[in-house]
Amino acid sequence: MRKPIIAGNWKMNNTKAEAKVLIQELIPLVKNAESDVVICVPYTVIETAAALTKGTNIKVGAENVAWADKGAFTGEVSAQMLKEVGAEYVIIGHSERRQYFGETDDSVNKRTVQALKNGFTPIICVGETLDEREGGVTEQVCKRQIIGAYAGISASDAEKTVVAYEPVWAIGTGRTATSGQAQETISYIRGVLKELYGKTAEKVRIQYGGSMNPSNVSELMAQPDIDGGLIGGASLKAADFSKVVNYK
Ligand code: PGA
């Protein structure tokens, strides 16, 4: 059985002072969670978040990681730096990075390799745009992104990864994929992982992301291949995020 994993993606929100308030409110609300609970936060907040959540069931993640160990990469943050401040998870290839910051399947792969090499759990994001869904190429797009992300990665490493299927048209729009649409594509993605890794694909947790919230989480989580959620907007309020975490 795959243990559900609910992860918040704060994106570019919350100063240290704001983060402190939100995390302190969140800790007691999620302490009995049956799922893994992760908050992926801006770089400047990681150390604060790790200190506040120490000894709790909340783990902390970053929202990206450099593919190189160190050197002339202005604006990037290395895995070692992230580890030092207490991050254990890292989101890689979020659609906003692909859309606005030139992230490609190749750079997603390089960042994933680096995350695994340094003991992080990568949360690898894939998903089609509205044009791609309407053009009937959802499966091709997800397949290309998965094959790209996992190039050269062994089965024993793949087992440690988490995939987030996030249809771009459902992110921040309030327009959630139906549980049927989400299940269909996620089960397709598991099939692609099966082609790459055989039985190991059964162990990889695949989240749904895109306007997941307290009112749709139960139905989505009831689907056999949906193992969790990557939560943007609803992770910015302790009451909402804790309801998603405690969906059962
Ligand atoms: P959303 O974002 O929940 O606000 O749609 C999800 C994500 O981008 O990870």
Image (spheres, rainbow, N blue to C red):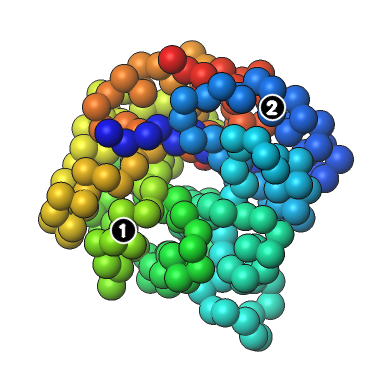
Q: Residue 198 lies in what quarter of the image? A: bottom left
What is the total number of numbered labels drawn onto the structure image?
2
The residue carrying pointer 1 sits among few (fewer than 14), some (14 to 19) or many (20 or more) residues within 10 Å by Cα, namely many
Tell me if residue 166 can be seen: yes
Reading the image, the residue beneath label 2 is 26
Q: Residue 221 lies in what quarter of the image? A: top left
Tell me if residue 185 can be seen: no
What residue occupies the far bottom of the structure in this picture? Answer: 72
What is the distance, in whole Å, between disc 2 and disc 1 at their CAs?
Answer: 31 Å
In the depicted structure, whether residue 187 falls above or below residue 174 = below
Q: Judge by depth and name the residue closer to the eye, 22 or 170.
A: 22
The residue depicted at 27 percent of the width and 33 percent of the height is 1
Helix, strand or loop at disc 2? helix
Q: Judge by depth and name the residue closer to the eye, 165 or 20.
A: 20
The residue depicted at 37 percent of the width and 47 percent of the height is 163
What residue occupies the far right of the structure in this picture? Answer: 17
Reading the image, the residue beneath label 1 is 158
Tell me the kind of residue under disc 2. Answer: Leu
Task: Report x, y in % for residue 246.
Answer: 51, 19
Tell me the kind of residue under disc 1. Answer: Ala
Q: Earlier in the sequence, mark 2 or mark 1?
A: 2
The residue depicted at 37 percent of the width and 34 percent of the height is 3
Q: Residue 77 lies in what quarter of the image? A: bottom right
Task: Report x, y in % for residue 222.
Answer: 31, 20
Q: Judge by depth and name the residue closer to the eye, 182 or 45.
A: 45
